[in-house]
Image: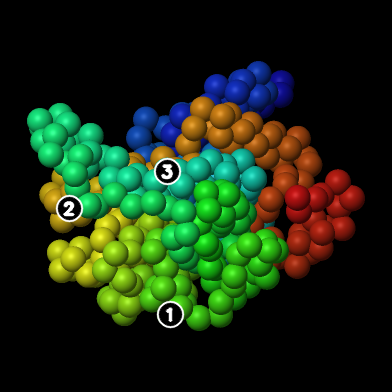
Amino acid sequence: MTTIQKVFISEPIDERGMAILSDKVEVMLAPDTRKETALALIGDADAAILRATTRFDRDVICAGAKLQAIVRTGIGVDNVDLEFAGKKGIYVCNTPGTNDETVAEHVVAMVMALSKQVIRMDRAVRAQQWHERFSPRQRDVKNKLLGIIGLGKTGLATAHFCTNLGMKVIAYDPYVANPLPDVRQTDRLEEIFSTADFVSLHCPSTPITHKMVGQQYLAMMKPSACLINASRGDLVEEEALVQALAADSIAGAALDVFEQEPLRADHPLMAFPQVILSPHVAGSTKESNERIATAAAQAVIDTLTGLVPKHICNLDFFPADKKAKVLHDPKYSFS
């Protein structure tokens, strides 16, 4: 009798991904994202699909004695202990290329909403404050300077979209050479923060980028400038941002990610009308969710059928023999 393999899923994924899995494995959909729930279920799982909230630390990975793959929807894998999983020979994969432009579109929407004061104007109409039509707060985006920190696929897509809006773009990334002719690259973060009208973050969460944007860089921003973060919540020191907003030393912010999620109801950021907040949805649309779920499910099926999945993030931590076997597998591709 063949044993049916089981897949732990931390939060629901699009039905297209579920359809790929449904007739091949038994799906264990977690009722919540608590660590205790993951610990209780993961022991039976041969693979796992995670979204942003559930953390797979050493304890959870240890409890998953049968785990062969942990697949993270989207790009970020900072909620998984890559090194520990790698040492145990467990693939940790992500799904790059599935929502890069989706996130970039969200950033553009934030730029436009901040410039045109869309949310403030909507509230004014609902509050019968028609005099806001004479407000001097609205701005054109054409010829404004966008500073991008991080020139991965999402940063590049954002730069491309914004140059098409007539914006000027300056970018910082010490690891990537800028391929776009209309984007000027700088090797100084100080130049980004001191000159840009909008600063948009497109970095992974690492020890280097953790709380990178704090009082030092916020103090360099122009009083008319805005900060945008649709990348990782821990890139910004929220207390310093609150202080900058309270002092009117920057004009506003648009945030899709936060240090702690969900954002609590009494968080100081809630009090600022010049701040736009969204619940970690920049990468989520109907179309991108379909692409992400399909890619995640395929990575699981590939692994469980003996193939090497694409987009392994922790191969450097694998035992040498298994790493060599993967690298020399003719069916394996990094793309």
Residue at position x 63%, y 62% in the image: 182
Q: What type is the residue that disc 2 sits on?
A: Phe
Please provide percent x and percent y for residue 105: 50, 43
Residue plotted at (41% across, 73% down):
195
Alpha carbon distance from label 2 to label 1:
26 Å
Query: Which residue corresponds to the image point at 39% horizontal and 46% vertical from the top-left?
Result: 112
In the depicted structure, whether residue 265 falls above or below residue 320: above
Give coordinates of residue 46: x percent, y percent.
60, 38
Q: Earlier in the sequence, mark 3 or mark 2?
A: 3
Q: CA distance from mark 1 to mark 3?
A: 25 Å
Q: Position of residue 303 (x, y in %)?
A: 71, 41
The residue under label 2 is 272
| Residue tagged 1 | 190
Quarter assignment of residue 290: top right
The x and y percentages for residue 102 are 53, 41
Q: Which residue is mark 3?
A: 109
